[in-house]
């Protein structure tokens, strides 16, 4: 029985190692890092959990007037958006980057006049949506050059960006419902991925595969998960 247990452990290890080779994790520098939020008595707090050591680290703590909205993780960077209503209306929306190695937090950008939301990150690129309701655009910010690139021009409601390499995916309501669009940063080409009457949203992309939810965005509406292959 002992030898059988050892054999099972070794098989599990080699199977896990094989998966790591075939598909590198989204968090390539810190593959054992996970994020979660707590909505308890302290408010909505972002925590980071380092699986090998069991370390739990607080990334963001809210105040009476400042809270976070969304977050994403890649490598050693955690990005998240906040809304700060200190001083009253209008509130300030911002994107921050938390460096897992140094534990430093830096502000990427902020705005009092526009809503900033739906962040995504891959490498040194950060995607996000900014604008007023119904007239929003998708942007990509380069952490290295500190340059911002606007990749859309149609005024519409937009949500949920995701990044992989040179590809940016988001949901766009320009045709009356949320359809998926893809922008290639290398070629500058925009492609509409879905065209049906359902809403498609909360997409993620890796390689040439996009996964997303299809169904109404209304609360408790029926939904399904779909996979779309670009090639």
Image: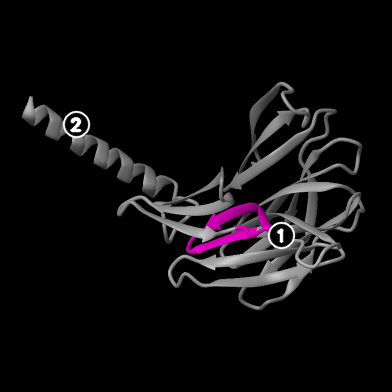
In the image, what residue occupies the spot 68% across and 77% down?
Answer: 146
Q: Which sits earlier in the primary sequence, circle 1 or circle 2?
A: 2
In the image, what residue occupies the spot 85% across and 28% down?
Answer: 197
Whether residue 70 appears in magenta in the rendering, the answer is yes
Magenta span covers which residues? 62-80
Where residue 154 sits in the image (x, y, percent)? 91, 54
Q: Which mark is residue 65?
A: 1
How many numbered markers are drawn? 2
Where residue 131 sits in the image (x, y, percent)? 86, 59
In the image, what residue occupies the spot 68% across and 32% down?
Answer: 213
Q: Are marks 1 and 2 in contact (CB under 8 Å)?
A: no
Q: Main secondary structure of the magenta part?
A: strand
> Which image quarter is the C terminus in?
top right
In the image, what residue occupies the spot 83% across and 34% down?
Answer: 195
Residue at the top extreme of this rendering: 222
> Can you say whether 4 is above or below 145 in the image?
above
């Amino acid at each position: 029985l002992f030898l059988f247990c050892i054999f099972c452990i070794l098989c599990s290890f080699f199977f896990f190692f094989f998966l790591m080779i075939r598909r590198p994790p989204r968090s390539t520098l810190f593959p054992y890092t996970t994020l979660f939020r707590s909505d308890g008595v302290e408010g909505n707090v972002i925590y980071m959990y380092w699986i090998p050591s069991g370390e739990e680290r607080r990334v963001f703590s809210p105040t009476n007037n400042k809270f976070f909205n969304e977050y994403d993780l890649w490598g050693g960077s955690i990005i998240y958006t906040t809304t700060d209503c200190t001083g009253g209306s209008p509130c300030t929306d911002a994107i921050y980057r938390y460096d897992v190695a140094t534990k430093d937090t830096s502000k990427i950008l902020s705005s009092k006049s526009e809503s900033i939301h739906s962040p995504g990150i891959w490498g040194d690129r950060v995607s996000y949506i900014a604008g007023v309701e119904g007239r929003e655009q998708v942007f990509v910010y380069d952490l290295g050059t500190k340059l911002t690139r606007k990749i859309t021009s149609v005024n519409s409601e937009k949500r949920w960006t995701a990044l992989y390499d040179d590809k940016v995916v988001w949901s766009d309501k320009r045709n009356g419902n949320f359809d998926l669009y893809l922008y290639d940063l290398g070629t500058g080409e925009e492609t509409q991925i879905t065209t049906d009457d359902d809403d498609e949203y909360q997409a993620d992309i890796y390689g040439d595969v996009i996964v997303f939810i299809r169904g109404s965005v209304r609360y408790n509406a029926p939904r399904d998960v779909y996979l779309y292959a670009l090639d």
